[in-house]
Image (tube, rainbow, N blue to C red):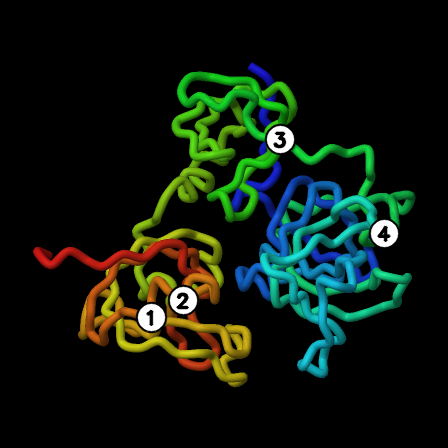
Amino acid sequence: MGALLLTAGTHLVATTAAGAQERAVLRSEENFRREPNGVVLARLSPETSLRVLGTQGNWTQVEVEGWVWLRSVQVSEDTSFDLVVSADGGENLRSGPSGTILARLEEGVLLEELGRDVAWARVSRLGWVWSASVRMAPAADAPAGRADPTVARPSGPSSRSPGGFRRTAGGAILTAPDGDTLAVAEPASDVEVLRQEGNWARVRVEGWMWMPAGNEAALSADAGPSALEPDDLMADPDAHAGRVVAWTIQFISLARAEPIRTDFFEGEPFLLARFGGQDGPYVYVAVPTDRLGEVEGLVPLERVDVTGRIRTGASSLTGAPIIDLISIQRAREDR
């Protein structure tokens, strides 16, 4: 089988602080978000060059720069920005007028204007990408917002029929068709196709990774949800950040974070809940803004099953644990 390059494991890849003004390129196609795990502003093309501003946990803040067609934007009503993408379905961000496509901007995305050239506007936008998808670039790399035109966009599986092992042309393996990068398959990799839906294929890969003796315990703990409970987290708040837990909680309310809640982003939606039921400790579940539809119908005191990644074992304001939502479903009535 061909090689599979695992470059963006969601919790096995550590990130380091990046200095301001550093350059980076994307390893693969990736979401460009308004805030960590927040609303998707654009889908960035592989090898797009970015300016790195800093990191926060597993996320990197970057600036992307390029050109948009003037007919696809309007003057922004938000005084913090100059333009807004007004074209139905969004618009391409290019390396120059009619140049290489760097990203697909979502409709409604706000942009800062840097200049104009006849029918085109040069624009920039700050946002966040998953750190493991970023490769720091040497000084000789292209300026921010300019992709290497010789790099082809990765294509999907070479055959459309499902089932069996098939050789790919290489490209990103995503958590979902609109999700973040989980791994990158090198050209000529062999993957097992489980199901095909249009141009997307659900695949299974198999291979070997280096795991020296003594590391098994730490790695196996990340293989699935742990048995950690809120009391475990509050006893040592920093020890378990990044671990995955699966809890049954009793929903109390859906709220948005005020500035005083410094463990959240201002305005970030979260669930206030009790672990296990009405006598359990309070817990918070941070909800990505593009997944609000999954929680807005919850009824107070309803029990739900959530899977989440631990943000902190004890929030600075109340001492309650905070987890980032991965999945949610209503608990079975027969429990």
- Secondary structure under the numbered disc 4 in the rendered image: loop
Quick check: marks 1 and 4 in contact, CB under 8 Å? no
Given this view, does label 2 or label 4 mark the residue nearer the observer? 4
Q: In this rendering, would 330 be left or right of 260?
A: left
Q: What residue type is labelled 4?
A: Gly
Quarter location, residue 168: top right
- C-alpha span from label 1 to label 3: 37 Å
State the SS at label 1.
Answer: loop
On screen, residue 241 versus residue 98, left or right, reads left
Q: Which of 261 and 2 is in front in this view?
A: 2
Q: Is residue 170 left or right of residue 214?
A: right
Q: Distance between the residues labelled 1 and 4?
A: 42 Å
| Residue where numbered disc 1 is placed | 296
Q: As displayed, is residue 219 above or below residue 322?
A: above
Instruction: Find disc 4 in the rendering and name its residue.
Output: 96
Find residue 315 and report its horizontal and vertical position in percent.
45, 74
Mark on residue 292?
2
**Residue at 59% from the left image edge and 44% from the top image edge:** 13
The residue that mark 3 highlights is 155
Instruction: Please say if 155 is above or below 146.
Output: above
Q: In this view, does 153 lie above or below 305?
A: above
Front-lying residue, 275 or 74: 74
Q: Residue 185 at what x, y percent from top left? A: 59, 29
x and y, in percent, of residue 183 in the image: 56, 36
